[in-house]
Image (cartoon, coloured by chain):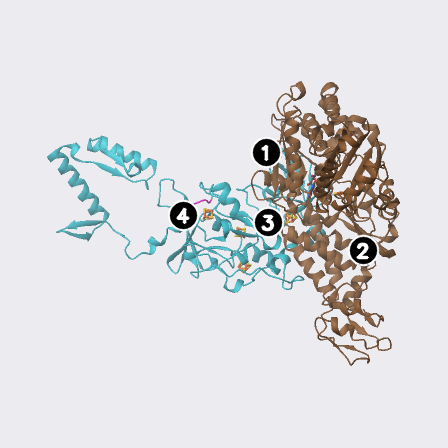
Amino acid sequence: MNTLMIDGKYIEVPEGTTILEAARRAGIYIPTLCDDPRLEPYGACRLCLVQVKGMPRPVTSCTTPATDGMEVQTSNEQIERIRKTIVELLLSDHPNDCMVCEKAGDCTLQELAYFYNLRENRFWGERRQYTRKDANPFIERDMEKCVLCGKCVRVCEEVQGVAAIDIAYRGFQAKVCPPFERDLDCEFCGQCVSVCPTGALIGKQSLGKGRQKDIKRVDTVCPYCGCGCNITLHVSRNEVIRVTSEPDTLNEGWLCVKGRFGFRFVNSPDRLKTPLIRRNGRFEEATWTEALGYIASNLKRIKKQYGADAIAGLSSARCTNEENYLFQKFMRAVIGTNNVDHCARY
Amino acid sequence: MGREVEIKICMGTGGLAAGGRAVMNAFAEGLKAEGIDAKVSENCSIHQVGCRGFCARDVLVDVIIDGKRTTYQYIKPEMVEQIIKNHIIGGEVVQDWTVKEDYQAFHDKQVKVVLADCGEVDPEDIDSYISRRGYEALQKVFREMTPEKVINTIEASGLRGRGGAGFPTGVKWDFARRNPGDVKYIICNADEGDPGAFMDRSVIEGNPHSVIEGMIIGAYAIGAHHGYVYIRAEYPLAVERLKIALEQARQRGFLGRDILGSGFDFDIKIKLGAGAFVCGEETALIASIEGKRGMPRPKPPFPAQKGLWGKPTVINNVETLANVPAIIRNGALWFAKFGTEKSKGTKVFALTGKVNNTGLIEVPMGISLREIIYDIGGGIEGGRKLKAVQTGGPSGGCIPAEYIDISVDYESLARMGSIVGSGGMVVMDETDCMVNIAKYFLEFTQAESCGKCVPCRIGTKRLLEILSRITDGRGRPGDIDLLVTLSEDVKAGSLCGLGQTAPNPVLSTIKYFRDEYEAHIHEKRCPAGVCKNLLTYTIIEEFCKGCTMCARVCPAGAIVGEKKQPHHIVQEICIKCGACFETCKFKAIKKG
Ligand SMILES: Cc1cc2nc3c(=O)[nH]c(=O)nc-3n(C[C@H](O)[C@H](O)[C@H](O)COP(=O)(O)O)c2cc1C
Ligand code: SF4
Ligand code: SF4
Ligand code: SF4
Ligand code: SF4
Ligand code: FES
Ligand code: FES
């Protein structure tokens, strides 16, 4: 354990903790834009600069390990001045159209501008302008709003192992894009969308459906597979418009394409909402009690008439391990057959 | 008939550009045609050599007869026949073509350690290097020195990194040596991206084995078995000579397994860079070797802790490594004799700009700027007045003429707001506009920023835009203060050395030449007469003879007037090219 002092407070942290993490644990706020504790330290936005006693210049707290006896100041005149300059510089190269931006109300850049009360900007000049639209089916990429925090690039490589995007060009022209600026053609897991601090990456299905302040959040579990990732449904006007996941869940906020973008079935008019029983050649809506009773009586009937091995059970990958275990137990112990299989084998 | 005749022809990049290969062929054919073997000597050889610094005089040719050297300058193939006939056969030096006192003066105050053999050895012939004590240091190391002793010697010599930061080389090696690990790397940084810099290129082109020998010694000291030379692909000649040298070193057993029977294994790979300035920064360079985008990352961890592929790695500059064999051969004390208390040895500079003698020079640390400019450089072109010296390239600053007597060493230049840097030195006179100089360097750094961090990516862009509007005559009151605050924030806030130093040219020119900025902004005037938009050309009626010359050269048709009557420039049409100003024989055109 290392003990360091941040803004006069003593804090004990394990070896390898960054100054930023240590400060957060102590409830001390340091502004950040490119940090994500789930990703490798990057140090690009420079907002998290702090002064460490004995160091000749401010250092980024998100990349500097806390060491024993360190004395840290998270704010002083110079640091605040640099932070303000950084935000002003970012805004000087930004569309600033919060008015119609999907991300308004949930945008780190907007928060920073508010926090630093940036009504006026000392800097102005050329602004990046990109007219070409990425035609991929899932992700709206508005690179004029990109602050080059690199989170999308890192999540795609470090977490997803895909590396579908990287930064191209130099300096002011630097731009996150797929190879040769083609349309994005990847797994569409949307991890990049989930980490983007601005409105640069937005799920296309959610466009224009409602911003953060309008939605009701419903925590639930993804129905797609046995992993059971925690998800949060964003509901607006009784419609699911977006799915997110929080970093403090068992799946650390990471989802796959199905969990993140495959939610439109929820609102589909074709969706089955009750069990159906075929009567006289036609499906008729039934209650669960009716349906389960119908299944039980028929299983019994068949077993009696033809023997247990006339029955086979097929289970689904969307069930958990526990459910699959119970299912085979049911087939073997209750029905009395080894005819049990799983869709994952096909 | 026992005379020994040696002909050395400059085939550095400058020499080749001036036609070195044709001159060499002319010598070979000429000597054969004359039947030189029979007439003069059987001992007649022609060698290609690397740059000796005075490229403006190329093709430079040394004719050495029995040890007596005559140097010819500006040699063309058609001049060779006469040199052979009169000098080599006839014994009469062709006086008109030899170098004069100014050539001697250029070399007098130089002290050559790194460049000692550049221009002497044939860079494509390992024996030529060996004949000048090449690989002697390596043998000495294996014979009688432990890695610790090598490190102690380098530390005692006071050698500091020549790549820019001036970090003590021995200390760096010691870090890497102490960091545990079976796999370690040594990398030679030959990226050399500063505009106008060609120090490292010349060393590799002129004497590649000195760098290789330095690397092997460094590898032995830190315990590395793999080395890389990261060199830009725009240096094809250097790359080619390096490849040849590596192959020859392998054949002689200086590289590979069990080097010279020492049990030590080491080999070197070449990695070509694609010409990004930022890839000279060590962490970006490592990323680039690893196949990633060349972007710096924060330190710690330092490369000596976690470098290439996560292993302890030493990165040294070409010139740093080329110093090593000489230090080992001659001892730490010998090296420490040159230089000042804290800056030991010599430094190679690319001397350019408004001096009479431009070129590659090697001087002892602590020499004054005055000696460099007036003794070595031969003074300011056209006898004009010195205004400032820019050192350290885009990361450095401008030192005004009144400080010309300062000592050239790491500490003194840093005190002036500049740096030694990798060795760019641009001399400026009264016809240089300091705002424009700052803009020039910012154009470079802005374009070469990797774009990772905000202060550098957008900050240098905004700095450049402010400088551009000032030089365009659209500067606003308050712009100087805005430049200063933004510069300070970019310096303090940026991730890597590029952004941390990019504002130096702005800050140092504002510090010493604030009045020039003010003239641009408040009076819309460029005192040096450089910034086009701030120039007006007018015709002084009393002097104008109505000769019509100016009207005829004006490409825009902006000059009107009757023959033999005073002419007049229509300002709305004038494009400020200055053609009229150059043409008028009566000095009737005023620029200002
Ligand atoms: C933007 C930037 C460019 C650099 N370019 C070079 C270069 O071209 N060659 C070089 O040797 N060092 C360069 N450096 C310095 C290297 O990062 C490193 O300090 C040096 O290679 C270490 O070698 P030394 O200790 O022998 O000087 C550069 C640094 C920065 C920040
Ligand atoms: S990305 Fe953020 S700051 Fe930019 S327009 Fe959208 S809400 Fe506003
Ligand atoms: S959707 Fe997933 S795979 Fe595609 S770019 Fe984003 S993170 Fe990478
Ligand atoms: S798209 Fe978003 S996550 Fe990616 S670099 Fe830009 S701002 Fe960061
Ligand atoms: S200072 Fe410039 S070159 Fe260095 S990391 Fe930042 S953007 Fe890249
Ligand atoms: S959060 Fe530390 S540099 Fe961006
Ligand atoms: S290349 Fe010939 S002297 Fe430099």
Disc marking residue B511 = 2
Q: Same chain for the residues at labels 3 and 1, yes or no?
A: no
Chain hosting mark 1: B
Q: Which residues are magenta?
A: A253-259
**Farthest left residue in view:** A305
User: Which residue has dot 1 on it?
Assistant: B310
Contact? badges 2 and 1 (CB < 8 Å): no
Disc marking residue A32 = 3
Where is residue B551, by image quadrant? bottom right
Q: Is residue B18 visible?
A: yes
Distance between mark 3 and mark 2 Cα atoms: 34 Å
Q: Is mark 4 within 8 Å of ligand 3?
A: yes
**Horizontal arrangement in the rendering, residue A93 relative to residue B152 (left or right):** left
User: Which residue has dot 4 on it?
Assistant: A257
Chain in brown in the render: B
Q: Is mark 3 within 8 Å of ligand 6?
A: yes
